[in-house]
Image (cartoon, rainbow, N blue to C red):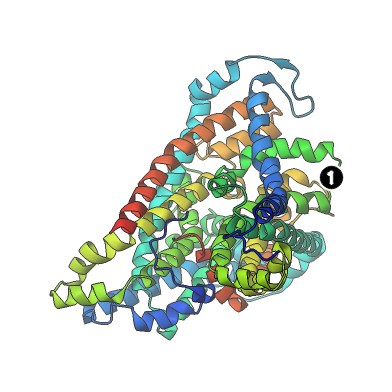
């Protein structure tokens, strides 16, 4: 074996390498098959059948459940709840993350300390993040109500998690608290990788701070921002823990996001068929939202590499 | 994923955590900003620090408050006590939950790395899987975990690994494989191919090249991605919620989520138990921040 992988000199080398390559990647492909391909096939099949958690695949029922998932008001509403949560949470995290990243200067001691502080919310297990904020929002003994009452602003406790639309807003706030640091880290890394020369050129041209940001920094960092936005939207659609701990989908069905709705249908009503159909509707929504962002991102990246 | 907006920054990128500091001095570009922007930046940074730190400080304070102080409307406690901590550990198996969490996270991390590392090498060097394999692998991570959870529940039940740390570790390990592969990709591609070629001229086959030559070079990346994988599993809730139902296998997030079931309001104990669970990841964040930031930013913005 005297050949290097990329430039095979003998006829025997590449074939052997290809075999070894497949052998090395096989466990990863098996993992993807188990955690993604099998569940997807299962979900599609189960949504065409009458299935309970105890006895899946009792009989075939055709398109009925899928049609219901896409047309039934209640089920569609839970899909829209996910949208209502994910889009504001993602956009705000990225915008706030950009502002903080622009302000952060890790060349100073303070900047480095803040970067460590920011890791903490990101590292906090979401269930614990839910507990923390549930305590802060609590009607009796919660930080916010204590402060509001102490300042004489309210006489009755504010039901942050028991009122609409306050509950959804609270969930979004917690999500922003947890995930903005992630956005800051990524955006900051992108800002650091920008060439100093363009700033100097802008300075020579007499551009002010705002002008420099608008016509130099922002266009250069935009591809990274869109990447972060895409990641954040994907993460926000996964939300489950916060809802489970803080609101259980309430008040009413106000925070009953798709993940939580599927969980309830499958694990509390044991109706796997309906849960499968709801899952498919949810996947369609995630795709409809993520795909344009992904397309926008690759277009920006292509434009960037041409320039 | 292969398009890059960043300059190909050679090998030094593996120490990305340290790079920004030097880079800030070198490039920074904002040193000529007028005084008012600097003041504004300081305000933003201070506000951010307060926003991110305050809830954690509040949790710590609640965990040391007397139960009647918690339910009163005073913000500052009248005194501190260990009562919540001792009763959290006495009345709930918090120590067992924590042990389960650590075991599952460590085992899943090892499983994920053992699967990801050979795959990354095969993709970067042996052209295994073709051009689109990364898209396939990453898309497995895009789908919300709720999609996979019911079929996995059925599968785990069928193979008899329900409510066991082995089953939980296996499923969690497989679930983080796509993330691990995605984050490791750049580290492998940044190893100059000449190094492989030299090893192969010396008579190493692909596997020997991976183990003896490439692996030591990507070790920083493996550590960083290992930490990220550990934390992802440690923090996870949905999978352990579905796959374990007895105290001997439940992880800390599951245990804590169950503490709020009762009639009694147990804020103090929940705060103490929650804080217990946050300590391990916070220690990782403090002592491994360089690796952690490297692992988190690697692969994402490129």
Q: Which residue is mark 1?
A: B161
Q: Chain of mark 1?
A: B
Left or right? Give the position of B181 relative to A26: left
Query: Do we see residue A213 in this rendering?
Result: yes
Residue placed most toward the observer, B59 or B97: B97
Q: Position of residue A214 (x, y in %)?
A: 22, 62
Furthest-right residue in view? B160
Q: Please, what secondary structure does the residue beneath circle 1 have?
A: loop
Left or right? Give the position of B42 relative to A69: left
Residue placed most toward the observer, A226 or B97: A226
Query: Do we see residue B68 in this rendering?
Result: no
Left or right? Give the position of A288 relative to B233: left
Furthest-left residue in view? A206
Name above or below for residue A245 compared with residue A129.
above
Q: Crowding at label 1, few (<14), some or many (≥20) Cα neighbours within 10 Å?
A: some
Determine the image quadrant of residue B37: bottom left
């Amino acid at each position: 074996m005297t050949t290097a992988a990329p430039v095979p000199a003998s006829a025997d080398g590449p074939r052997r390498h290809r075999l070894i390559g497949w052998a090395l990647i096989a466990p990863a492909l098996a993992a993807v098959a188990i955690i993604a391909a099998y569940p997807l096939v299962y979900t599609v099949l189960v949504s065409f059948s009458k299935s309970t958690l105890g006895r899946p695949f009792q009989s075939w029922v055709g398109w009925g459940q899928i049609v219901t998932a896409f047309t039934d008001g209640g089920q569609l509403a839970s899909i829209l709840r996910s949208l209502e949560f994910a889009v504001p949470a993602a956009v705000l995290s990225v915008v706030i993350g950009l502002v903080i990243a622009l302000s952060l200067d890790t060349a100073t001691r303070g900047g480095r300390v803040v970067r460590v502080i920011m890791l903490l919310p990101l590292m906090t297990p979401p269930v614990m993040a839910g507990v923390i904020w549930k305590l802060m929002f609590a009607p009796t003994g919660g930080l916010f109500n204590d402060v509001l009452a102490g300042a004489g602003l309210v006489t009755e406790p504010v039901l942050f998690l028991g009122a609409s639309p306050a509950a959804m807003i609270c969930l979004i706030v917690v999500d922003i608290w947890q995930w903005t640091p992630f956005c800051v880290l990524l955006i900051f890394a992108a800002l650091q990788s920008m060439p100093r020369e363009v700033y100097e050129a802008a300075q020579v041209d007499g551009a002010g701070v705002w002008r420099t940001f608008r016509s130099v920094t922002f266009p250069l960092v935009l591809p990274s921002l869109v990447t972060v936005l895409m990641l954040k939207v994907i993460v926000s659609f996964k939300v489950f823990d916060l809802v489970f701990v803080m609101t259980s989908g309430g008040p009413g069905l106000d925070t009953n996001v798709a993940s939580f709705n599927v969980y309830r249908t499958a694990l509390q009503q044991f109706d796997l068929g309906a849960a499968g159909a709801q899952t498919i509707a949810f996947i369609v929504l995630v795709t409809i939202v993520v795909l344009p962002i992904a397309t926008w991102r690759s277009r920006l990246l292509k434009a960037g590499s041409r320039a | 994923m292969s398009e890059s907006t960043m300059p190909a920054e050679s090998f030094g990128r593996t120490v990305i955590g340290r790079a920004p500091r030097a880079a800030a001095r070198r490039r920074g570009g904002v040193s000529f900003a007028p005084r008012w922007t600097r003041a504004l930046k300081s305000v933003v940074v201070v506000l951010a620090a307060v926003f991110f730190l305050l809830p954690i400080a509040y949790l710590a304070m609640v965990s040391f408050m007397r139960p009647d102080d918690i339910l009163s409307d005073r913000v500052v406690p009248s005194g501190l006590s260990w009562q919540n901590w001792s009763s959290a550990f006495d009345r709930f198996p918090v120590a067992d939950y924590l042990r389960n969490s650590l075991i599952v996270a460590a085992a899943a991390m090892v499983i994920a790395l053992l699967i990801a590392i050979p795959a990354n090498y095969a993709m970067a060097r042996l052209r295994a899987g073709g051009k689109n394999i990364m898209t396939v692998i990453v898309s497995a991570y895009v789908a919300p975990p709720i999609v996979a959870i019911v079929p996995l529940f059925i599968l785990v039940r069928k193979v008899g690994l329900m409510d066991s740390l082995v089953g939980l570790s296996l499923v969690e390990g497989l679930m983080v494989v796509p993330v691990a592969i995605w984050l490791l990709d750049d580290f492998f591609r940044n190893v100059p191919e000449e190094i492989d070629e030299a090893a192969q001229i010396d008579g190493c086959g692909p596997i020997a090249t991976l183990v003896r030559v490439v692996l030591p070079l990507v070790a920083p990346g493996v550590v960083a991605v290992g930490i990220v994988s550990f934390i992802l599993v440690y923090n996870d809730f949905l999978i352990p919620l579905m796959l374990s139902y007895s105290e001997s296998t439940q992880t800390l997030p599951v245990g804590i989520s169950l503490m709020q079931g009762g009639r009694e309001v147990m804020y103090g104990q929940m705060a103490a138990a929650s804080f217990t669970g946050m300590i391990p990841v916070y220690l990782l964040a403090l002592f491994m921040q360089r690796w952690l930031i490297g692992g988190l930013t690697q692969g994402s913005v490129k």
